[in-house]
Amino acid sequence: MMIVWVLCDERIGSVKQAIALANIMSWDYIKKDLKYTCFVKTPNFLSVFDKLSVDRALLQELILAPKPDVVISSGRRAARVSRLLKKSYFPTAKTIQILDPQMSFAHFDLVLLPKHDLFERNISNVLVFDGAIAYFSQDEKKQMLSYWKDFWNYLPQLKVALFIGGDSKNIKFQESHIIDLLNQTGKLAKTLGAGLLVTASRRTSASNMAIVKDMLAKLEIPYYFYEYGSVDENPYFGMLSCSECVIVTGDSISMCAESVVFGKKTYIYADVLEKSKKHQRFVNELIALSYAVLLKDFEAYPVANSYVDVNRSLRDAVLLKLGLNG
């Protein structure tokens, strides 16, 4: 039986993609929670700092563990640990890196890059994929629905989920964006006669959170709001499973991908993406593939969803690239 490690750190979106890939591959896996030192901030091309970048006790634990056959990493920091493990301790392990490692791709057996990153070179160990990597099994979907289906009995039978992201390097949510988003969401919900399931993210500013609450109270639509960081159980997957359709802000690649892969009709609010060409390309790609439509166009365009076929194709391509049997 293969031993598969998934390297996990605080970058939630990256970790989700690494775990999703392991599930798409139907591999049993072991999560390895990473701890870094201050040296992880040094540029990745400086491999001399790799060993110093990892917590000493954690590295010793990794070295003494049963040898992995496959190591999956995602994001710049986890890539550094993967390089160290293969180069110094487990040279026969197959290493799979998701997203740009910001170092030579030659350090990995396979590098998976999203198409919206505009990678155009033809390199044998690089595989370009559509959108973002996400996965839900049919059993997981059924369990989520069974667990959450009675939680919002006080709302109309039809429900619209609204997932709100927040500020990042090239994306800034202004008050006008939040007001526009909630007005468009209200229009869609009223058209369907639906209630609202709303949550924000850890990147949502306190000021924008206050605007969301104020707008929800004014929309005259039955709703449930979960404030990120609450002591209550996070109902994100419950909202996903119980909703008729999902509205997502386009700054969150992972939430857009999860909605689409779950099989939900997905509407994306993209007006906040003016300064992020990468996110614009991602959203345009989903729309071109008929996986989602812009929220402002919800009345004009139906949503077709066939994302499961992409996961099947991705699995086959990874096996082929690595020379592994299914």
Image (cartoon, rainbow, N blue to C red):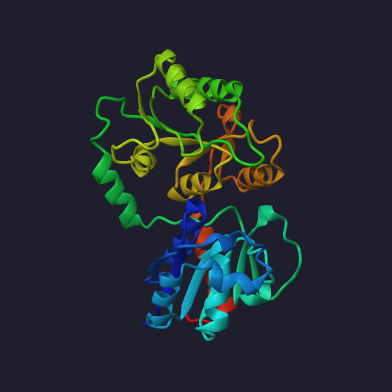
- Above or below: residue 166 compared with residue 119: above
Asked if residue 28 shows in the view, the reply is: yes
Of residues 78 and 20, the one drawn nearer to the viewer in this rendering: 78
The answer to whether residue 262 is left or right of residue 125 is left
Asked if residue 317 shows in the view, the reply is: no
Q: Position of residue 324 (x, y in %)?
A: 51, 81
Task: Write the residue at 40% across / 78% down.
Answer: 3
- Above or below: residue 222 compared with residue 48: above
Q: Position of residue 215 (x, y in %)?
A: 46, 18
Q: Position of residue 173 (x, y in %)?
A: 59, 30
Extreme bottom residue here?
Answer: 92
Q: Position of residue 142 (x, y in %)?
A: 29, 50
Tally of marks: 0
Quadrant of the frame with the N terminus: bottom left
Task: Write the residue at 60% across / 77% down.
Answer: 109
Of residues 257 and 193, the one drawn nearer to the viewer in this rendering: 257
The answer to whether residue 122 is left or right of residue 130 is right
Task: Write the residue at 45% across / 64% down.
Answer: 34
Based on the displayed image, in which of its 4 quarters is residue 52 positioned? bottom right
The answer to whether residue 326 is left or right of residue 272 is left
